[in-house]
Image (cartoon, rainbow, N blue to C red):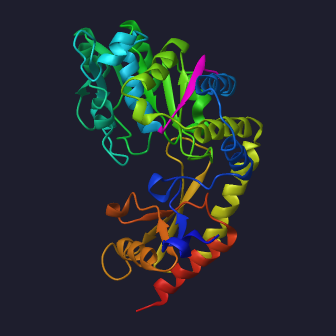
Amino acid sequence: MDLFEQFGLTRVINACGKMTHLAGAIVLPEIAAAARESLNHFFLLDELQAAAGRIIAETTGAESGCVTACTSAGITLSVAASMTGTDMAKVLQLPDTTGMPSRVLIQKGHCINYGHPITQAIRLSGAQVVEVGVVNRCTPEELRYELGKGGVAAVVHVESHHTVRYGWVQLPALVKLSSEFEVPVIVDGAAQDQRLRELVGTGASLVLTSAHKYLCSTTGGIVAGRKAMVDAVYLQNQGIGRPMKAGKEAIVGAMAALQYRNRQDMHAWTVEQNRKVALILEYLKDIPELKLSVDPDPNGCPFSRVRLTPAGSNGLHSAAALNTCLAAGSPSIVLRAHRLDEGYVHIDAIEMTDDEIEYVCHRICEFYQGD
């Protein structure tokens, strides 16, 4: 079945990475098989989620877990859980937060947009967002002052390259500070599934990640953390979380993905990613107008990306022109253009085959050989 031809869709070569706007990851065969099998059956959904919770606990070191529609949904539901606990009357009252602690702190440098503003994901629960500090500086003293005011339901912390990478309170220190006030810390680690055990190990109350990024599963969000908090998250499905519930294929897919990760040879995986990086460097090494370098993942995940920096920031051969040209072709080549305004782009080869790498590099060579 050719979906592109049937529905008139654009063929894409993903040189950008694990991105929602490119429809998530290529689902691994083992995980796709499990998700496909789930479509043939009925389940008691609470029982299925309980099974997912056991697997999440076993594979992350958390006390419990559940599956949501996505990480963004998980943020909203986790904030809601921090306000209601397992009080069903409060669950049904949201988004009216009268009588509940409803202030949610977030460092201003973490107020990112990952498709929509994270502050909006927080406010969807009915909570009040309190941005602490300024974009490039948030001190423990500022956080302590806001925590001391009272009425704080949670602190949301973002682990992402999109955040300002300096002048901020890092997660272990934030967890320690928040624990003094018995305020839970909710971690948005959407693309940090390779660091799940590390993030859970900081003592954060809840850690959220995407099933459809490096876990290579069907679309879903994984919530891992303290059992009482996870129970409160799951209870939101009977309240504001009803439109955000995960289907059986998302739950089974996430379970299969975590089990696959648990037995995966991550060293061998990293070696394979390094081989792809070396292949790109070899193909593009003779383009004088292009400076090549390798950037490790800024969050410490075990892979790197190739940085392409054109000699000139403006004109026909700029990074912006290269990005536009490749995207406009058929198939469309989508580079990682997060740093386009700074004059360079990346090739993220994780989702690319060797044939695709060769084709993309050929297109880049053609671009620089043109007028």
State whether residue 270 is above or below residue 342: above
Furthest toward the bottom, the residue is 371
Tell me what residue is drawn at x 67 percent, y 24 percent: 51
Residue 332, given in percent of the width and then of the height, sits at 48, 74
Q: Nearer the viewer, residue 335 or 10?
A: 10
Query: On the rendered structure, is 271 left or right of 325?
Result: right
State whether residue 15 is above or below residue 174: below
Q: Nearer the viewer, residue 42 or 20?
A: 42
For the C terminus, the quadrant is bottom left
Q: Nearer the viewer, residue 168 or 222?
A: 222
Tell me what residue is drawn at x 33 percent, y 13 percent: 90
Number of numbered callouts drawn = 0
Tell me what residue is drawn at x 54 percent, y 45 percent: 219
Residue 166, given in percent of the width and then of the height, sits at 36, 37
> Is residue 244 in sight in this rendering?
yes
For the N terminus, the quadrant is bottom right
State whether residue 122 is above or below residue 104: below
